[in-house]
Image (cartoon, rainbow, N blue to C red):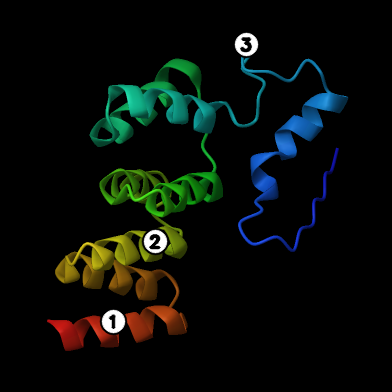
């Protein structure tokens, strides 16, 4: 099955509801039988706020070992940005750290972590993460610009 959802709404994230559409056609797809393709992300969003955002990596490890959970890099990044929009920068930081842990070869996760550190005024850590972006994606112009801006502040 392929589902395509197009939107021109700022903040409209089809990735957040595609599974609900799929579930309409595949009713057996649910969390109870662990067939849900978003099981890992959904469980993180349930458990991390209860157990603590600082324990996000440990929770993800447990979900992987105990349930074979898989995670979606884009959904985790979206969650981090939702937390930032809700004025929860420390929680967002922990989600972005988790995304870096789970997806260490994806440049964008380091970009999000760098942006969050910069927003918190931790320019040394922001610089480290933007340099990591360039290691993974040497032609990333945004990271190059951010590094130059951060160096001016240091």
Residue 37, image x and y in percent? 65, 30
Pointer 1 or 3: first along the chain? 3
Q: Residue furthest front?
A: 86
Label 2 neighbour load within 10 Å: few <14, some 14-19, many 20+: many
Horizontal and vertical percent for residue 140?
46, 80
Marks 1 and 2 sit apart, C-alpha to C-alpha, by 14 Å
Q: Which residue is mark 3?
A: 32
SS for callout 3: loop
Name the spot of residue 139 as percent of width and height, x first: 47, 83
41 lies left or right of 87:
right
Q: Residue furthest top?
A: 32
Q: Which residue is mark 1?
A: 147
Q: Quick one: SS at disc 1?
A: helix
Q: Say which residue appears at 45% left-offset and 24% top-offset.
A: 46
Q: In the picture, which quadrant includes the C terminus?
A: bottom left
Give residue 5's mark.
Answer: none
For image coordinates 23% across by 81% down, the residue present is: 150
Q: Is residue 151 above or below residue 98?
A: below
- Residue located at (80% from left, 51% from top): 5
**Residue tagged by mark 2?**
112
């Amino acid at each position: 099955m392929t589902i395509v959802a197009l939107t021109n709404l700022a903040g409209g994230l089809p990735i957040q509801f595609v599974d609900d559409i799929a579930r309409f056609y595949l009713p057996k797809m649910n969390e109870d039988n662990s067939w849900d393709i978003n099981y890992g992300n959904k469980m993180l969003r349930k458990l991390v706020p209860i157990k603590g955002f600082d324990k996000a990596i440990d929770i993800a490890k447990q979900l992987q070992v105990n349930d074979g959970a898989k995670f979606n890099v884009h959904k985790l990044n979206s969650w981090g940005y939702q937390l930032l929009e809700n004025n929860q920068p420390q929680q967002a930081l922990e989600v972005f750290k988790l995304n870096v842990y789970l997806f260490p070869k994806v440049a964008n996760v380091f970009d999000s972590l760098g942006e969050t550190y910069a927003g918190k005024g931790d320019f040394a850590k922001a610089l480290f993460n933007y340099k990591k972006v360039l290691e993974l994606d040497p032609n990333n112009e945004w990271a190059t610009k951010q590094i130059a801006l951060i160096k001016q502040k240091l």
